[in-house]
Every structure is written in structure tokens, then in C-alpha cells.
Image: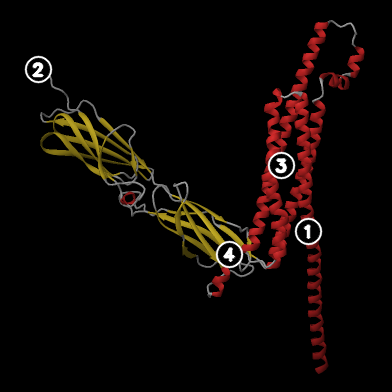
Amino acid sequence: MLETVDAPLAVATYVDVQYPTYLQRSTKTTWGNERLEFRNGMRLPQGTQVGFWIRANKPIRKCDVMQVRGVESQDATTQFTVELEKPVTEFAIPSTVLLGNLFVEIRLWDDQGLCATRVQPLVIAATADNVPEIDLVLEGISTAITENAKLPIRSKIKDDYDLKEAWVETIIDEQEPLKSELQLGTSGDGQSQIGQMDIDLKAMREAGQSTPAVGSTYWLAVGATDYFDVPLSPDAAPIEHVGRSTPIQLSVVSQDQFLVLLDRREAAMRRRLEQIISELGQLRDLLVLTNKNNKSPQETTQETTQEDASARSAERPQAEEQESKESKEQAKARILLLRSQQAAAQVAKSEGELKGVLSEISLLVSELINNRIDSKDRRDRLGDKIKTPLSNLIDTKWKPFAQDIEGFETSLAKWSPEEFANKIDSAIAQNNEMIVALNAILADMIEIQDLNEIIDRVRGLLDQQSKTLDRTKQEQKKSTLDLLK
């Protein structure tokens, strides 16, 4: 007589979790030890100590275990047997550190020496801790600075958990890097931290510290570490997560060289502004043409199909005439829709370019201040005659103008020809106001540009005069020496 019995089987599986120390230091969440019910697709942080708690359907004497751990792009396989002192229905499998994805297979043996008919797989994926991500911005500073510049560093640092340390790293030419601690504060989004610091080259030089001289190259970068302390493999030492921003290279120039660079950039903005004014003139022509297309069907027919009309017979059937009239109305609607779309596209393009000019002019003003350039007239002109009027133009006049143009396409179907004509006339008037205002701003830029050209010529003359005086002194000295021979 044969007696059948159930094969040993794990009916419930739990995971005993001990989170790594870098998570237990985190202030964002609460970490510690816990027991979780195992589920397919389970993910746990890298470095977690993982063990299994098995509940079987019958008393178990031993359990064969095979572990495959993904470590450094390789699979490390371990096989062992859990021997139990006496048959039990619940038992633990020793823990292991989750360095990579973990694949475990278990086979149970009952107290009668029967083994499970199938191997039970257990898979846990490791969630890697990322290196701190750092964005470095120098507010009001471009690629060239003076010896007396103040560098406002604004850095945004993002990490999965908490940051351990952050610093600013500076290098002068080929010298050794110098580290300075970066103070951190929370950002508004709650996902990152803000590091702020001002490097004052003038104050550093007065304090006897090493600062870059004219002709030097100054490198800046921000670095940060978190609390990650997990090795890549069981036999390796824990690694440190160090994140660094993209380094910024600055050229140290004299004040005269700095002003020449600023003049060139302002000249480039002047050319862009001239292009914007030209495009606004083309937009005005497009609006005028749209107004012509908005004429009544009878007027449009007289202008566009005069030759066709003379060839037609006056006794055309009424149905054919009605069909022709409808096709003309449809053609007119398509033309008006196309013109409206072209006008909206041009307005959007010009708006983006205007904001680009405003951003660059604002940067020029900030650079004059941060580089301690003693030129109040220049700052006042760039700020009061260019930046402020341009900003007011965009905020007060351009926005309603752009909204009116963008509304043509959506409201065209519900407007009568007379209403649409009034809207176009209003847009043309607004467009003309914009051109006048931008020409006034442009006049200030052209005027100072001409003055700068004169100043550059004067500087050239003074340089030539200085060289001539030096050569004269050398010749006089040489003549005197020749007389004494």
C-alpha cells in the first residue's frame, strides 16, 4: 500500500530588511529594520542587508539555497544548505548584502527526507543610489572677468537622500586646486539644495590670498558628497559618491580689455535689434496685405478675377453663380487664416528675440557691477536708456499686441469683415508704436557705439604717442652714450 503525502512547499515568504547606514542618516524618511512580505518585482536600496523568513506547509528539515548576486557587471554565485536542528514549519535563510540584483532559488526537504518537486525562485532588484547632480551658475558673470571681480556662485545640488558636504573648487592656471566650504540651504521645490557663495577677488588679494592676475585662467567648479558607503563587491572597500559640476573657465583681463569685449557684445545686440525692427516692418506689411484680403467678396472678385469676368457670359445660370460665390468665400477664408497664422508666428519669433536682447543687456549691467567697473555713465545708459525701456515695452505694450495677433486665428470665424478690419487696424497701430519705441532704444545704442569708436581711436593714438616717446628716450640715451665714448 502506497501513501501519498504533500511535497514540501513555501506557502509564505517574508524579507527581513536592515537598511544601510547612509539611509539611516537621512532626514527625509525613517529607516531602520523591518520585515516585509515578499512580492514579485520587489526593489530595495543598494546596500540593504536582506534575509528571508520562510513558512512551509509542513515541517522542514533542511533547505538548499543558491544565490546569484549581480556585482560589478558580473554574477557571483553562492550555494549552501540551511540545516535545521529539528523539523520546523518556519525558519530563516541567512542574510546577505544587496550590492546588485539578487536572484535566489530554494528547494525544501521535509522531515521524511522528501524534497520539493520544484525550485522556488525569489528575485529582489537593487535600487542604486545616484551621485549628487550639480548645476553651477555664475550670476552676472560671463567668460571674462577683471582682477577685482566679485563672483556670485549659485549652485543647485540634487541627491536621492542627504548631502554630507559641498564645496567650491578653484584653480588658477596650473596651480593646485583650492577648496572652500559651500553653505547649503533648501530650495523651494524640496527636491534639491541651494549652495550660495560670493568669491571676492579684491578682498582676497587685500587679505594676502592668492588671486588670478591679468592674463591668467581661473577655473571654478562645485563638488558634493553624500553618505553612500557601500562597496561595489564584498571584498572591496566602500566607495564615496562624489559629484562635480561642469567646470567654468574664466579669463582674467584688464579693465580696458573688458570694456572692449562689452562693446562688441552690445554691438551684436544692436544688430539683433535692427533685425527685429526690420521684421516688425515686414509684419506690418503682412497685416496691411491681410486687410486687403479682408475686403468684401465683390471687391475681391473685381481685383483678382477681372480678366476672367470679361470672358464670362452674362447669362450664366444662377446655380453656377451661387457655387462660384461660395468657392470665393472659402478661398478668402483660407487666405485670411494663413495670413493670421503667419502673423502669429512672426510675433512669437520677435518676442523670443526681444527677450534674448533684454537678457543680454541685463547681463552687461550686472557684469559692470560685479567686475567693479567705475563707469557710472555706461551703467546708467545701459540700465536707464536700454534695459528699463525694453523691459517696459515687453511687459506693457508687447503682451497685449501679441495676444491680439494670436487671437486672429481662433476668432476669425465669428468676426464680421468690419470687425476683423478694425482689429487689423488696431494691430497695425500697435506695431507702429513698437517700431518707434525700439528705434528710440536703438538710437541710444548707435550713439554710444559711435562714441566708443572715437574712444578706441583716441586710445590708439595715445598708445602710438607713448611708443614714440619711448623710442625718442632710447635714441637720446644712445646718443649721449655715443658722445661719452
**Where residue 449 is drawn, which disc sits there?**
1
**Where residue 393 is drawn, which disc sits there?**
none
Count of numbered marks: 4
Q: Please tell me whether residue 236 is drawn above or below residue 278 in the rendered image.
A: below
Task: Identify the amino acid type marked 1.
Answer: Gln
Is residue 144 left or right of 182 when viewed as pictured?
right
Residue that badge 3 annotates: 350
Task: Identify the amino acid type marked 3.
Answer: Ser
Residue that badge 4 annotates: 150
Q: Which is nearer the eye, 64 or 55?
A: 55
Quadrant in which residue 474 is drawn: bottom right
Q: Which is nearer the eye, 288 or 47?
A: 288
Task: Identify the amino acid type marked 2.
Answer: Leu
Q: Are marks 3 and 2 in contact (CB under 8 Å)?
A: no
**Where residue 2 is drawn, which disc sits there?**
2
Residue 33 location (% of width, % of height): 25, 45
Is residue 238 left or right of 92 when viewed as pictured?
right
Look at the numbered disc 3 and give the secondary structure of its residue: helix
Give the residue at x 76% y 48%: 438
Q: Please tell me whether residue 25 is drawn above or below residue 457 in the rendered image.
A: above
Q: Measure the C-alpha gap from mark 1 to mark 2.
A: 107 Å
Quadrant in which residue 414 is drawn: top right
Is residue 178 left or right of 302 when viewed as pictured?
left
Upstream in the sequence, badge 3 or badge 4? 4
Q: Which is nearer the eye, 350 or 160?
A: 350
Upstream in the sequence, badge 3 or badge 2? 2
Label 2 CA crowd tier, 10 Å (few <14, some 14–19, many 20+): few
Upstream in the sequence, badge 1 or badge 4? 4
Q: Please tell me whether residue 16 is drawn above or below residue 207 in the rendered image.
A: above
Mark closer to the observer (3, 2): 3
Look at the numbered disc 4 and give the secondary structure of its residue: strand
Q: Which is nearer the eye, 230 or 107?
A: 230
